[in-house]
Structures are given as structure tokens and as C-alpha cells.
């Protein structure tokens, strides 16, 4: 006998949690489609040559790569590289701006630890332009996420927005361009390592002037409302072109985020968002749950200059964000943020009281399903207690007891399993009860 | 530059087809949930030791197996083995009968050829009993599939039902039990190899009496309505226990399929369905599209005696069926069976006539989305012709032109892109039009 076990780092849920997980996934999808985004479903496996065109460093080490026959294969480690491949491959068939979503599993052979997964869902939205892409899309993308999180009811959250050009412009102004990537990375880590270590690293490892370090530090610590920060930035005596362009872009993006309906309670400018990856070239986003910042960003992304340079000469700028759903679900559960309501697929469980009642019970189940009511019918010949326990454990709202008396009199005994109330009703009344809400 | 290509044997669809594929997938899921089946989402990767506990022969050769660090891993090749592992692993947490569905991708490194896929969706439903499972579930399972195919509108189809015990009983009666598995396999292939080769194989390879071969042949060729065939079988002078039990079971299953609403046009007894796999022990099913039998069975399954003998001492009988969705979709397209209607996510595309109209256009998009209307807003600054072409290519029903005149007068110009009719209306009228159907 083999011990049945699931690999570490792989999330496998019990039915109740799975139903909840799927509800969240469905809500995300519904919102993505509400904005007209097109679905994609790319393969889990790709040729290593294609998938690793751009990868390198830490990511490459984590990739599940293997040979099967003559093929050198990889499991996808994100949904962006497959998107790049897809757009390059199908360029002539697609309509631009190409707005697509993909909600799918990706694979990274990380060392498993609490809250880290080797198989996890990413829920990506991206808009890809042909040659150019209007800045308004940089406002639409976070607005979609705003609607997702509002509907998921996960409590207060803040979408932080910045523009990498501003920080890059400042770095250029301070004549620190040679170490720009390192500075971005340090700023990304500033919360984790603390201000002192940030200063020490720049001073000792990179020999940066104390005055310049202070300027950087002051800059990333700027606080205030969107308008205040934009006003403050505009008045800074820095003429660097990137700095100015970044401010102009950020002003447009934040203005139109409001037009798209994002309330000021739920978004902020945060100039310390650097998003270490060189991939991002303009607007950048991160999202935190208020009071649960320790969870980390639950939804991030940004503007990129060129999606698929490794596959095509076409110039494909874009903007996107992604929710790491598996990790988010784990954290929401761990932090008791999810409403702990019981989850069920079926609204009602029909319990035939004896084998003689099966036929009429099935006929009733047909009728309920025709009325779009999700219905389980219990078909085992067991004691009443066992039958009722099954209905209760299923978390359905109602149980219907189909006994010989009920059948003879064409009535239905229905029990509200939450309120613990039982009544005997006609078919019409039964349908009215079950169609409520 | 790397050529962007998708591996052979992997289906990757353009957005229009992907929307259609997802609609089919959603319909299947909706029907599974209508019957109260619980969702599962097991990992794509499992430990090889666990996944290969039972595999062997052809299947094992096709499995994507590889090592990562110390782990010997496999990609799942079906959804049944992961179900077995899941039920054994979570036995004490589950409620029985455990009715679950899983709609997910599986992996087989077959030689790629037309209509064969290395990555494909299976849409499984199974009910698992603890120690025993009532025969009524053998009637419910094909009824669910009946509803799926009715709603998918794929034309006339027939669910064929049989019971392996009947054929087994006959084989025992003919004293051919030693070669029972071979006979089952030959009967499964009879359509493909033809009657003559069936007879020859039994005569030459297995030295079976001509008289016995004729009895087998007569048996699998029995035709007639459900009642006729049941009547005929009952009157056969064979007292073998398996034979009799199989008939009794088949009678119950077909009777209750009718109770569950399956019309006689859509199901038949077919005693030649043997389902070579020893896995099945009672009821067996196959489903064919009338006139397109060459496609093969589009949905198969059956009753099994014990799901997880390799993982647990618990006795877990069950019954299930599965749709091979990727292959089915491919065949439906190839055979022009799918309604060729244009597919879109968005019902309407808003086209701002100039950048000055963007703000009001976004406000309208908010309003439409609040009314649960999937809406795309086109945000590029291009010529009118380009904007309209985008709306047309998106396959949305409607385009709304937001020009300065419209904004000044608080009216909306909406074009029905199918009927090619344009009108200017108030917001209320606009919402009425867009909420239709």
C-alpha cells in the first residue's frame, strides 16, 4: 500500500474551502470580463528554448525543466512569458489594444515554506498596444483591481501608485545613474531592512555622498494626498526630463483612476514603490490590506515598454497587474479575513424517506433543477439520522424530507437547516422558498 | 530572436475560439453543480510513487515524469488517480456518498497527430460510496451528461449503456472465463476490426468453438428498445449469477435514467460496450453523436468496485463519467457541429470621438458596468475608422459613439453592429437596449 500524500508546497483544499476559493476566482474573472478583457488559456508546458528566452538568475533555478524524448520542456513559471509568446505568434490575428486576462496555475520549485507555494494561481490582466498604448489604460487597470477587491470584501485596502521615471529622474539628477538598478532594489527593500541599513548600504557599499542619500531618503518618504504629492513634486527644482515626464504621467493616471471610480480612500501615491525589475518602465502598482501590510503586496504590476522583444521586432508596450491568488487565499484564511460562512454547492438536499419514495424524489429533483436550483438527492438506503447528518454536513440551506405521507398528499416537508425551522408546503410554496435570494 | 511557437499536441486558441471553449466548459460546470457535485482542484504534479501506484503498460510510457532536486515527479495523466489519492488522504473529512467534479488539464506524451492532444481537459464526475453505493447513482450520472449535451446543443446524441456483468456471465457460461479479458478487448474493437476478424481471432488465436463464437456474436448484436432488450435478456436460458445480476442492475439503471428525465431518443442498451479496462465492474457507458460515430465516444465511464485500493484499506465503490473536452471541442469544430456565431466578452464598445470625450466616456463605462453590462472602452487616440474597426472585430453587439455633441446634449449614439442600425437615445433608453436578452 502506498501512502496517499500531496507534495509539499502544493495547495489541495477540502471541498468547503475549494468552493470558497472558486467563488473568489469567479469574482475575479467576472470583473475582468466586465471590462471586456479576453480570456487566454495557454499550455502549462512550453519548449525550454521559448520559455527561457528571457529568464535568468533566481527564476531559472526554480523552473521545472525536463526532457521527454527529444523535447526539452519547461512548466511555465508565470503568465507573462506565455503572453509574450502568444502575442508574437498570433500578432496578425489579434486586435490592438489587446486586452487579455488569464487565471491559471504557474510553477516554481521554491523551497517550500509557510505561505509559499510551488504551484499557484496567477490572475493576470494586461493591455498590449501596437507601437504605442495610451496612458488611460494605466488608470483602467488598477480600477479593475479596485472593483475586484471591493467585491471580495476583504476589508480596507490601498492601491499604491508611482512612476519609475520620477525616481529614475532623481537618480540621474543626483548623478547616480550607474547604480540606478541597485538603488531601485534597495528602495524596494527599505521597509524590510530599515532606514539605517539603507543609508549604510549606500554609504559603505556604493560610496554615495551623505547629502545625496538624504535627498533619496526624503524623496521616498514624501507623504500626503494625491494632489498634495503631485503639487509637491511639480514644485521641486529638478528639470530632468524623466523626472518631469514621470510626474506628468502620474498626474494623468491618478486623475483618471478617480474618473474610473476609484475612491481616494483606496489609493495613494507612494514614491518608494520601485518594483526592482527592470521590466517596468513607467507606472507601477502595489496593493496592501490596511493593518495587514505584513502579508505583502496582494496585487502588483506596472507599465512595460516592450512585451515580446525576444520573439518579435514588433514594438509592444503594455500595462498590467496580477493577483497571486493561491498565496492571497492562504493569507486571507490565516488572518481570518475571509467571511467564515459555510460553503455549499447545493442549495437543498432531498432526502427520500424510503426506497419507495425514490421515484417521486427524483421527479422533484428534476423540477428543482429545471428551476435553476442546485439540488443534491441522497440515494443511499440508510437511517434517517444518517440522511439528515449528510444534509447538514453538506452546508446546504435546506433539506426536503420525502416520505410516503408527503407523496400521498402532494406536499413537501422542508427544513431550513440554518434557522432550524420545518414546514410542510405545496410545490409552488416550495419553489418560492428555494428561489429566494 | 527566438521563434515564438507552441509545442505540437498542445491546443492554444485564438480569443474567439477561447470564448466559445470557455462557454462549453462553463455549461459543463454549471450542470455538474446543478446536481450538487463538489469541486476539486488537485495539483498537476504528484509524487511519482503516488501517481504510478497503479499505472503500467502504455499509460506509464506516456507519462511526463522527471526529477527536481530529490523529488521524483509526475504530471497527472488523468483525474481518477488524483481523486483516489484525495479520497484516501482526506477520508475522515469527507461526507459519503462523496460526489465531486473536476474540470482540469491532464498530460500524456502521446505521438501528436490530428485530434490527439498531449495536454487536454477532462471533465469528470464521480460519486464515491463508503463500503457500498446505491445503484440509483448509476442512473443519475448519465442523466447529468444528458443535460450537459442537451444544453450544449451539439445535435442528436445517444448514451449507450450496458453492464459488464452480463457479458462476463455469458463468458462464464460458455466456459471461456480464462480468456475473459481478451474477449472483452476484442468486443471493444469489433466495430474497428469487423466481424470476420473478430471470429478469426477467437478461432485461431484462442481456439474457441465456432458455436460459442456465434453465441458471443449474436449476443453483442442484440438490438431493440430498452424494454425489448431487457425482456429478451430475461428470457435467455442462462442461470449464471453474474448474468442475472447484470440484467437486474441494467433494468434498474435504465428505468431510473428515465425517471431522471433522459428521453428514450437519447439512450440505448448496447451490449457490445465492454470497456476493456478491468477497472469497470458493472454499469458502463459510452456516448456518440448520431451520424458522427467516427468521432468516437465523447463521454464514457462506468461503475467501479474500489477506487483507492492502492492507498487505503477502506472499500470505496463508485460510478463516474468523463468528457474529454479538448478533443471534443476539436472534433465539434472540425465537423462544423458548433454553432458558428461570433463570440465576444463585451456586449458593447464605447468609442470616445476625441480625447476631450474620454472623461464622459469613462463615466458611461462605469454606469454600464454597474448595470452588469460587459463593456470595453477604447482609449487610443486614432482615426474614427480605426476605432470602429476595433469595435466590429471585437464581435460586440453594439458600439457607442461619444462625441462632443452627444455629451453637450446628454444623449448617446448607439450602433447595432449586427443589424447595422444606428440611433441616438437617452441614458434610460440606452440601458434598456443593452440589458435586453
Image (cartoon, coloured by chain):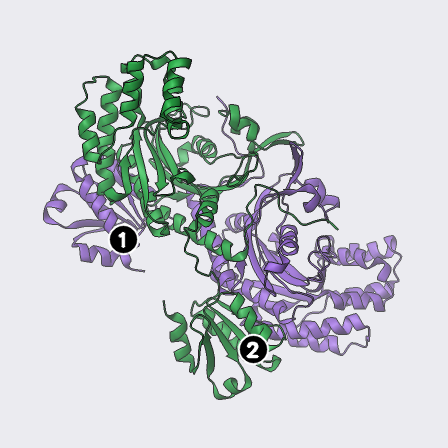
Chain colours: A purple, B green
How many labels, in total? 2
Observer-nearest of A83 and A333: A83
Picture layout, residue B267 above or below residue A371? above
Do badges 1 and 2 share one subunit? no
Q: Residue at x 57, y 49 (%)?
A: A42
The quadrant of the rendering that contains the C terminus of chain B is: bottom left
Query: Does residue B392 appear in this view?
Result: yes
Alpha carbons under labels 1 and 2: distance apart: 43 Å
Which chain does the numbered disc 1 sit on? A
- Estimate the x, y position of residue A331 in percent, counting from the top left: 55, 49
Chain bearing tag 2 is B
Q: Residue at x 22, y 22 (%)?
A: B244
In the image: residue B209, left or right of residue A363: right
In which quarter of the view is residue A225 placed? bottom right
Q: Nearer the viewer, residue B290 or A182?
A: B290
Secondary-structure class at tag 2? strand
Q: Can see residue A338?
A: no
Name of the residue lying farthest toward the left: A408
Q: Position of residue B358 (x, y in %)?
A: 58, 78
Residue A48 in picture, x, y percent from top left: 68, 42
Residue drawn at (29%, 15%) of the image? B212
- Judge from the rendering whether residue B57 lies leftward or rightward of residue A216; answer left or right: left
Q: Residues within 10 Å of mark 2 (few under 14, many from 20)?
A: many
Q: Which residue is mark 2?
A: B352
Q: Which residue is mark 1?
A: A370
Label 1 secondary element: helix
Which of B229 and A99 lies nearest the eye of the viewer? B229
Amino acid at each position: 500500500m502506498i501512502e496517499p500524500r500531496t507534495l509539499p508546497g502544493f495547495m489541495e483544499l477540502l471541498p468547503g474551502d475549494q468552493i470558497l476559493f472558486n467563488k473568489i476566482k469567479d469574482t475575479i474573472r467576472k470583473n475582468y470580463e466586465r471590462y471586456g478583457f479576453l480570456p487566454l488559456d495557454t499550455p502549462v508546458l512550453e519548449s525550454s528554448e521559448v520559455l527561457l528566452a528571457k529568464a535568468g538568475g533566481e527564476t531559472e533555478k526554480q523552473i521545472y525543466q525536463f526532457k521527454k524524448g527529444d523535447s526539452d520542456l519547461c512548466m511555465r513559471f508565470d503568465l507573462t512569458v506565455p503572453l509574450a509568446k502568444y502575442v508574437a505568434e498570433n500578432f496578425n490575428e489579434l486586435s490592438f489594444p489587446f486586452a487579455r486576462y488569464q487565471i491559471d496555475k504557474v510553477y516554481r520549485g521554491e523551497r517550500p515554506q509557510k505561505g509559499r507555494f510551488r504551484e499557484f494561481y496567477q490572475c493576470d490582466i494586461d493591455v498590449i498596444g501596437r507601437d504605442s498604448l495610451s496612458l488611460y489604460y494605466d488608470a483602467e487597470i488598477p480600477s479593475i483591481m479596485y472593483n475586484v477587491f471591493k467585491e471580495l470584501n476583504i476589508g480596507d485596502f490601498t492601491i499604491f501608485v508611482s512612476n519609475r521615471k520620477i525616481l529614475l529622474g532623481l537618480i540621474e539628477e543626483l548623478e547616480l545613474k550607474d547604480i540606478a538598478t541597485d538603488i531601485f532594489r534597495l528602495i524596494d527593500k527599505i521597509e524590510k531592512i530599515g532606514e539605517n541599513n539603507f543609508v549604510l548600504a549606500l554609504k559603505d557599499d556604493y560610496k554615495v555622498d551623505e547629502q545625496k542619500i538624504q535627498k533619496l531618503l526624503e524623496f521616498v518618504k514624501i507623504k500626503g494626498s494625491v494632489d498634495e504629492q503631485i503639487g509637491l513634486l511639480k514644485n521641486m527644482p529638478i528639470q530632468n526630463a524623466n523626472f518631469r515626464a514621470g510626474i506628468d504621467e502620474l498626474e494623468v493616471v491618478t486623475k483618471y483612476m478617480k474618473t474610473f471610480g476609484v475612491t481616494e480612500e483606496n489609493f495613494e501615491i507612494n514614491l518608494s514603490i520601485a518594483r526592482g525589475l527592470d521590466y517596468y518602465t513607467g507606472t507601477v502598482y502595489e496593493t496592501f490590506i490596511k493593518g495587514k501590510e505584513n502579508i505583502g503586496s496582494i496585487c502588483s504590476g506596472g507599465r512595460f515598454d516592450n512585451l515580446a522583444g525576444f520573439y518579435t521586432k514588433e514594438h509592444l508596450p503594455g500595462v498590467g497587474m496580477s493577483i497571486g491568488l493561491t498565496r492571497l487565499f492562504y493569507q486571507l484564511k490565516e488572518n481570518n479575513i475571509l467571511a467564515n460562512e459555510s460553503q455549499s454547492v447545493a442549495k437543498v438536499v432531498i432526502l427520500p424517506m424510503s426506497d419507495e419514495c425514490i421515484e417521486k424524489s427524483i421527479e422533484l429533483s428534476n423540477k428543482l433543477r429545471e428551476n435553476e436550483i442546485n439540488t443534491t438527492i441522497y440515494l443511499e438506503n440508510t437511517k434517517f439520522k444518517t440522511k439528515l447528518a449528510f444534509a447538514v454536513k453538506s452546508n446546504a440551506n435546506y433539506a426536503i424530507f420525502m416520505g410516503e405521507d408527503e407523496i400521498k398528499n402532494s406536499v413537501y416537508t422542508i427544513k431550513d437547516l440554518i434557522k432550524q425551522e420545518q414546514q410542510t408546503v405545496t410545490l409552488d410554496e416550495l419553489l418560492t422558498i428555494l428561489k429566494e435570494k
